[in-house]
Amino acid sequence: MKKTGKLFSFITFLFALFFLYGISFAIDAKTDTIKLGVAGAHSGDLASYGIPTIHAAKLVIDKINAKGGILGKKVELLVEDDVCKPEVAGNTATKLISDGASVVVGHICSGATKAALGFYKEAGVIAMSPSATNPDLTLSGNYPNFFRTIAHDAVQAQLQVQFAIENLNVKKVAVLHDKGDYGKGAAVLAKKYFIQKGVEVVLFEGVTPGAVDYSAIVTKVRHKNPDLVVWGGYHPEASKIVTLMRKKRIKTFFMGADGIKDNSFIKVTGKYAEGVYATGPRDVSKNSLNILAKKEHQKAYGSDPGTFFYAGYAATLALLNGIEKAGSTNYDAIVKALRTEYVETPLGKIRFDKNGDATGIGFSVYKVENNVFLEQKIKK
Amino acid sequence: MDFDFLTYLFFGGLTRGSIYALIALGYTMVYGIVELINFAHGEIYMIGAFTGLIISSVLTMLGLPILAIVVLSALTAIIYSCAYGYTMEKIAYKPLRDSNAPRLSALISAIGMSLFLQNYVLLAQTSDFLPFPNFIPDFEFWEPYAHILTSPELVILITTVIVMICLTILIKFTKIGKAMRATSQDKVMAVLMGVNINRVISITFIVGSATAAIGGILIACHIGQINFYMGFTAGIKAFVAAVLGGIGSIPGAVLGSFVLGLTESFFAGYFSSDYEDVFAFLFLVLILIFRPSGILGRAETKKV
C-alpha cells in the first residue's frame, strides 16, 4: 500500500512538472516578438558548416534589436539542430513552427533542407538556406517558400567543367560521389556538363560514406587513369580518398565543390591537401559590409568566421529586410518583398528571382596552397 | 594492364581484409570464451585511437623523439583500452552473468554500452574529424612497391598475422589458455576443477581490448583521421567477417575478414562500388545458407 502511495505521488509530481512546462510555453507564445529560426547541423560531423550561421544570425539580430527592432518589435532567435540528417530535419522544422517562427535561416545540408521544406510550406513559413545547393530545391518549383543566398550546384558544376577544360586541360575525368542528395546531385551535373563539352567521363561511381577503406575505388581510378577526379560530397570522405590516392602515389588532379571548401578539410588532410581544387562562394572580402561583419565576428567570438557565415549573415539580413518592407509577417507579403526589394548584404546587393535563387551571387575556383584555399583565375 | 589491375585489387582487398581482421579477432575471441557478442568492441577500438592521438599530441609538445612517441602512445592506448574493456565487463556483463540473465539481455547491455561510449567520447572530446599523425613513416626499402601497398598497409597486414599467431598460441598452449577453453566448454565444471572463471573472463576481455587498441592505432594511421563514430561501421563489418569465418574461431575470423575484404574489393573493381555493401552481404547470406556456422565454425549439437 505504501509503495502504491509513493508511486502515485511521483506520478502526480510528473504531471505537475509537465503542466508547468505547458504554461510557460503558452506565456512564451504571447510575447510580441518576430521569431527567426536558425536550423542546420549544429553538432555532429558537419557542425562546422552550421554553427557559423548561428553566429551570423545572432550578430545581425543583436544589431537590429539594439536599434529598436523592426516594425516596433524585437526579433527573437530560435535555434534548432538537425545534425544534417533528413530524418531529424522534419522534427526540427516542426519544433520551429510550433515555437512560432515566421522565417527560418536554414537548413544547411540539401537532404535535410528538402525534408524540412514540406513542413514549412504547409505552415506558411519562409526558409532561406545559406548553403543548400541542390538545384531541384529551387528549380523544381515545388517550394515557393524556399530561398537561398548561395548559387546552386548547376552553376558550380558548370564552373568546375570550365575550369577543368580551360586551366587543367583535362581530356578524361572520373566522377565520384557519396550517394547522398548533395553529393550525387553535384556529381550527376558535373558528368552531364563534361559530356556536353566533349570530355570523356571514364568513371562514375558512388562510395559508401564512413567506410574504413577506399582502396578499391582508388585502384579503379588508377586503372582508368583519368586526368582529374571530381568529387561530389563532403570533406570527411574526400579527405580519406585524397590521402589514399597520394599515399598510393597517384598524382591525378582532385577537385571538389563547396562541400570540401572548408578549413576542416585542410586540417584533417594535412600535407595531402596541397594542390586540391574546390569551388566555393566567390571571395567578397572587399565588400564593406563583409569587412564589418568579419569585425563583428572577431569581436564577439575572438576568431575569424567559418564557412557560410557571410551567406548566413546575408540570409538573416534579407529575411528581416523582407519583413520590414512587407510591413508584417504575412507570408505573401514577405515573399513579394524578397522578390522585388534589393538588400545590401556582405555578398553584395542581392534580390531573389522567381525560383528563389539570389541574383548576383557566384562561385570561384580555389586551390589549396600552403594550407589555405587560394582563389584561382580562369584562363580565357 | 589487366593483370596489374587484378593485382592491385587483390592487395586492396587483402588490406581491407586485414583491417577487418584486426577488429574481428577481439570479437571472435570474446565470443569464443563467453558466448557474448560484445558490440562495444568497436568503441574500444575507437577509444584506443583517441588515446593514441591524445598521448602522441602531448608527447610531441614535450619534444620527444618520434620512436619514443610511437611506442609510448601505443602502450598507453593499449593499457587504457584494456582498462576500459575490464571495467566494461565488470559493469555491464558480470552482473547479468551472475544473475543468470538470458543471453538477449547481455546483448542489449552490450548495445547500450556501445552507445554510451560513443556519446561519451562525442561529449568529452569532439564531434569533429581529427587528423591522426602518421606513426608509420614511408619505408625506403618499400618505395618500389608503395604504389601497390603503402607502408601502413604493410604494417597492418603483418600485425594481423602476428596477432593471430599470438592469440592461437595463447589459447592453445598456455595455462590461462587452457582455463579459457575450459570456461568456454562448461562454466560449472570449470569452477569445480578450480578455474577462477571470473578472472579468466576478465583476462579475455583485456586481451580482446588490447587487440582492438592495436587495430585502432594502426587503422587510424592508415586512414589519417578519426572521429567518435569510427568504431561503429568498422565494428559492424568486423562482426560480419567474424560470423562469416565462424564466430568463436581465431583463424576463422582472419579467413572471414580476408574473404569479405577480397569480395568487396573485386566486386567494386569489376562491377561498381555503388553496390559494394549490397553484394558483400548477399555473399554473406549465401555462405551462411551452405555453412550455417561460418566457414571454419563448428556445428554445435545442443544437449537438451
Image (cartoon, grey):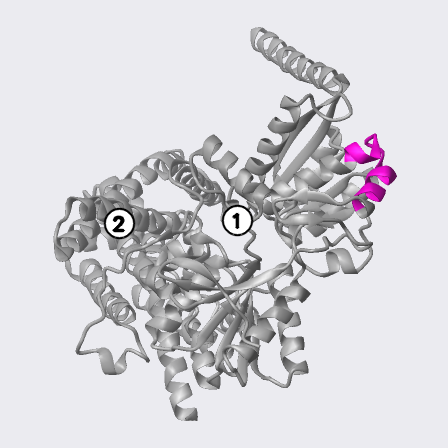
Residue B35 visible at all: no
What distance separates the C-alpha of mark 1 from that of mark 2?
Answer: 30 Å
B263 and B249: which is toward the camera? B263
Say which amino acid is labelled 2.
Answer: Gly
- Image position, residue B169 (x, y; %): 18, 63
Say which amino acid is labelled 1.
Answer: Thr
Check the residue under mark 2 and report the chain it is in. B
How many other residues sit within 10 Å of disc 2, few (<14), some (14-19) or many (≥20)?
A: many
Query: To which residue does mark 1 refer?
Result: A307
Residue B254 visible at all: yes
Under tag 1, what secondary structure?
A: loop
Q: In which quarter of the image is residue B257?
A: bottom left
Query: To which residue does mark 2 refer?
Result: B52
Q: In which quarter of the image is residue B215?
A: bottom left
Of labels 1 and 2, the one closer to you: 1
- Image position, residue B85 (x, y; %): 30, 43
Check the residue under mark 1 and report the chain it is in. A
Quarter of the picture containing the N terminus of chain A is top right
Q: What stretch is highlighted in magenta?
A: A323-338
Tag 1 and tag 2, C-beta contact below 8 Å:
no
- Image position, residue B290 (x, y; %): 50, 74
| Residue at point 68%, 81% (across, down) | A196
Find out whether residue A329 is within the magenta segment: yes
A215 and B128: which is toward the camera? B128
| Figure check: A67 above or below A56 | above
| Figure check: B205 above or below B25 | above
